[in-house]
Amino acid sequence: MSTSTKSRKITLRTYPVEMDVAGLAAGMLTLFTDEERTVLRFGMLPAAKMRITEKLLTEKFQNLGQPLTDDADLLTSYVNGELIDWRLSDLVREAVKAVTLELYSIGDLVV
């Protein structure tokens, strides 16, 4: 299984922030047990580690904006001089998907 840390950055659509998905996925892969790596070969990811990843990304992304209302999921912030409104849950979902796809690309899948 390749754990190359070659940087592959993407810009997320929900909020135009650049994210090094290759580095994050490679770092996550080092935390997988041998059993989890074997399961990854069949296209399955460890749910507990993915929940932790989602929680950590949520905490990180919360600092990018200010809540618009009592709904903490709807945030606003200035990006490149422009005020944008965005949903935290959408940004986290997009980031987790990008990391998941990168894990699949560096994992030695047999499917």
Image: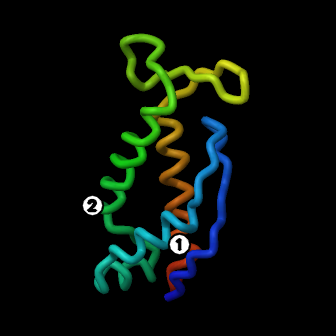
The single residue placed furthest to the right in the displayed view is 81
Secondary structure state at the residue bearing disc 1: helix
* Residue at 36% over, 12% down: 70
Q: Which residue is drawn at 56% across and 26% down?
A: 86
Identified by mark 1, the residue type is: Tyr
Q: Name the residue under label 2.
A: 48
What x and y, as percent, mark residue 27? 44, 70
Dot 1: within a 10 Å radius of its alpha carbon, few (fewer than 14), some, or many (20 or more) residues? some
Q: Where is residue 68 in the image (x, y as percent from the top left)?
A: 47, 13
Name the residue: 46% across, 74% down: 43
Horizontal side, residue 85 vs residue 43: left or right? right
Toward which corner of the image does residue 30 lie, by quadrant? bottom left
User: Residue 109 appears at what percent x and percent y?
Assistant: 51, 82
Question: Which circle's residue, 2 or 1, is located before the other in the chain?
Answer: 2
Q: Is mark 2 on a helix, strand or loop?
A: helix
Q: Judge left or right: residue 18 versus residue 92.
A: right
Q: Residue extending furthest front?
A: 81
